[in-house]
Image: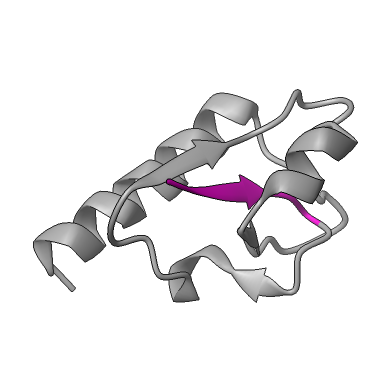
Amino acid sequence: MRVLAATPSADALYTDADMTGSIAIAVGAEDEGLTDLWMQSADLRVKIPMSGRVNSLNVSVSAALVTFRALRRRRKIE
């Protein structure tokens, strides 16, 4: 199973990630993000683009966005 880590420091956008096949979606705490262990173990690192000075979302919102995108990719509803 591949691990996808959502982090503001990633270069790739979550909308461009290949989320087909077995994948675990990892999101970190809002204040500290994912631990180094999760970041080093991740096969994919993605970010959610945002406008303005804010660089993170509520963790439940981030998880919902990435999960919804993965489901859309799997069902090919784009």
Percent position of residue 42, x then y: 66, 51
**At 65% from the left edge and 74% from the top edge, which residue is drawn?**
12
Residue shown at the point (64%, 48%) measured from the top left? 6
Answer with the quarter of the image where residue 72 lies: bottom left
| Residue 47 appears anywhere in the view | no
Query: Of 18 and 57, which appears nearest the observer?
Result: 18
* In the image, residue 7 lies in the stretch drawn in magenta: yes
**Residue in the picture at 12% in, 67% down:** 77
Q: Is residue 17 left or right of residue 78?
A: right
* Along the viewing direction, whichever of 71 and 1 lies nearer the viewer: 1
Q: Is residue 12 left or right of residue 4?
A: right
Q: Which stretch is magenta?
A: 1-8
> Residue 3 in magenta?
yes
Q: Is residue 65 visible?
A: yes
Indicate whether 19 appears above or below 32.
below
Q: Position of residue 7 (x, y in %)?
A: 73, 50
Q: Does residue 6 appear to the left or right of 1 in the view shown?
A: right
Instruction: Give the image quarter of residue 50.
Output: bottom right
Q: Residue at x 18, y 59 (%)?
A: 74
